[in-house]
Image (cartoon, rainbow, N blue to C red):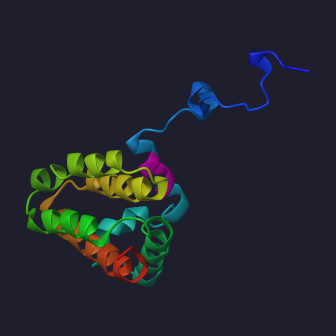
Amino acid sequence: MEQPKSQSRRGGGNLYRNPHYAKKTFGELGQDVRNQSFNENFSELLNMSKTQNLDAILTDIEKFVSNEGKNLSTSQLRNIYDKAKKATTVNELKLIRPNLAYIAGRSSNDKEKGLLAFIDLVIKEVDSDQKVKEFHTFFESVVAYHKFYGKQ
């Protein structure tokens, strides 16, 4: 017995048609990673040189990179890191944000997009030249753990 096309067993269709499965924005992806990996220590990421909680923060960064960073290539992360390292002002650092969105847009991997979106979220929090230096410290930790956990 043939089924009408509207009741096909194959299913199919696009999940994004259902508003419950709506595609997340770049900012929402970053916020998800924040909630999963850094809920308690997020405010300390741009204060790593002065925090009393450094071991917990480094553990959170390690878990974050091991979960989210396996599919991002070392060269992609190093390219972003090199640009960030050259940034000495808040505006220079914030100009990296479109590059993060571009790399994430080319990716089909949600974890990779999450890592990039989270870095973008941290950059949004930078509002002083001192925090630019603290961001460099944070990002250096990300690169170091990515060397161990990431894609070669």
Return the x and y of residue 98 as percentages of the image width and height: 22, 45
Q: Residue at x 52, y 56 (%)?
A: 35
Quarter occupied by the N terminus: top right
Q: Nearer the viewer, residue 69 or 107?
A: 107
Q: Quadrant of residue 15?
A: top right
Return the x and y of residue 118 as percentages of the image width and height: 38, 56
Return the x and y of residue 4 as percentages of the image width and height: 80, 15
Residue 133 placement, left or right of 2: left
Q: Can you say whether 46 is above or below 145 in the image?
A: above
Does the stretch in magenta take in 40?
no
Residue 130 seen:
no
Return the x and y of residue 52 as percentages of the image width and height: 39, 81
Q: Can you say whether 44 is above or below 23 in the image?
A: below
Q: Residue at x 36, y 76 (%)?
A: 146
Q: Quadrant of residue 8?
A: top right
* Farthest residue, direction front: 1
Quarter occupied by the C terminus: bottom left
Residue 9 seen:
yes
Residue 8 placement, left or right of 43: right
Does the stretch in magenta take in 32?
yes
Q: Residue at x 34, y 50 (%)?
A: 104
Q: Can you say whether 62 is above or below 129 in the image?
A: below
Main secondary structure of the magenta stretch: helix
Magenta residue span: 29-33
Counting labels gives 0
Q: Nearer the viewer, residue 57 or 4?
A: 4
Q: Residue at x 48, y 39 (%)?
A: 24
* Farthest residue, direction right: 1
